Image (cartoon, rainbow, N blue to C red):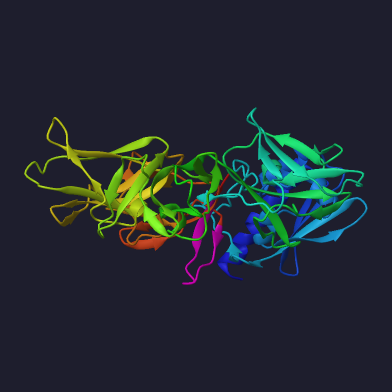
Amino acid sequence: MSNYIKIGIIVFLTFLTNVGNAQNHDILRMEDGKMILRISKNISQQQLDTVLKHINMMRIQMDSLRSNYLSQTYLADGWQISKQGKDFVELSKNIQSAHGKYEFMQDEFGMANDFSNSEINTFYPQADFGFNTFKNKKSVIKLSNGKTRFLLYQKLNANKINLSGSFNAWAIEEIAMIKTDTAWYFDLELKPGKHLYKFIVDGDWTNDPENKQKESDTYRGYNSVYFECNYVFKLNGFSNAKKVIVAGSFNNWEERELSMQKFNDAWQLPVYIKDGTYAYKFIVDRNWITDPANTDNRDDGFGNINSFFSIGKPMYFMLKGFENARNVYLAGEFNDWRETEIKLQKNSEQNWQCSYVLAPGNYQYKFIIDGNWYVDGANSLKVVEPNYTFKLKGFQNAKEVRISGSFINWPDPGILMTKSESDWVINVYLHEGKHLYKYIIDGQWITDPTNPLFEQNEHNTGNSFIWVK
């Protein structure tokens, strides 16, 4: 028997113990190469959350399971509803999943880790940019009181319609829509960003027939997509123009995608866009122009002048020394490494500095000093709003410890960690969801010896992973 199988049995027995302590009607078992979770239909949502927390699974709505519906996140990770009886429902997942073979590792003491400290909630959809388009009528409307109204103009003969989506973890019974003479409606408070949803009409799941924005749900067809907007592009004048389009770095300069609408004496387009700094131009009847109302215009390094705007709090970059340098520029992942777009200025202390708005994240960058690329310190990594600390215990005799992973695009040889009294640590930003990583100890790549979450990779060497809620 291989070490991985032995360790998997140890971890599995730990799973069973935790699940049994949490609720004796819920049983996790292995059968025919599958992991199976049996859930009593009489369990409360709170009890189910406790069970899922103990076995390191994301949140499932109990009312969804009773209606034989599993969320897109679970389906994408290989889970399915395999059996349903009068008093129970079973979820199953092949050990060889869509994301690779899941195996478990022991910690440095040879014992399986306890999962009770891990909390994973429903993964909400991420988006950098988005906009809304409808057919005949707007079916999602931003109200003056700040709430967002969802409307279904059809199905007026239905007895009951519920609204379900990523904003309520796909609960089925939670949001009952209100019927009027012309439509069903419900008002919600939404955060800016991407939201997936469907209507449940007398038990049948259906898309919003008026919403053009949709994406596959990997299960029953499509989810409707709505973007809660946080920015409005506006171009004053040009009342005789036939068509006005906006394009920029936020949509890869796609010149046909974003048609603006004329309102009174201005062309406008509401969008959702995450925090950051962006270049853009308007296309007025096929003629590209900068924004006449914006004085922040910059050369992109290729002879093109673009308008710029920012959303969010500015971050400051500083380079000390190099008093005799003529020109210093900043380039990084945040601007596709363009060399002459972001110019630094000298401050009163003769240091070079600039401000730049970035979304929460991890960004590699360099300075360019009179044409020469320069690494700032050990890493040249800018972490905006760090929310997670990686800690590697032990290895105090190592000369150098680095980390690499999906959250920083797998740099080789990785990012340097800092040595503390008993750990090697680094603070980073992790968005909601799954993150793969490995440590590099004096040049040797290893998985995390204290993390039992492990999946195989294309090199057959494995990656550790964590979930962030």
Q: Is residue 271 left or right of residue 291?
A: right
* Magenta stretch in the rendered image: 454-466
Q: Quick one: 280 or 224, which is closer to the camera?
A: 280
Tell me residue 310's x, y (percent).
Answer: 39, 41
Q: Quadrant of the C terminus?
A: top right
Q: Does residue 463 show up magenta in the picture?
A: yes
Q: Quick one: 218 or 178, which is closer to the camera?
A: 178
| Residue 222 appears in the rendering | yes
Residue at far front of view: 240
Tell me residue 74's x, y (percent).
Answer: 68, 56
| Residue 416 appears in the rendering | no
Q: Quick one: 403 or 349, which is closer to the camera?
A: 349
Tell me residue 99's x, y (percent).
Answer: 59, 65
Residue under the image location 42 percent in, 37 percent down:
312
Vertical comparison of 170 with 300: above or below: above
Q: Quick one: 82 or 264, which is closer to the camera?
A: 264
Q: In which quarter of the image is the N terminus?
A: bottom right
Quadrant assignment, res 184: top right
Residue under the image location 57 percent in, 40 percent down:
192
How many numbered circles are shown? 0
Quadrant assignment, res 34: bottom right
Tell me residue 167's x, y (percent).
Answer: 67, 42
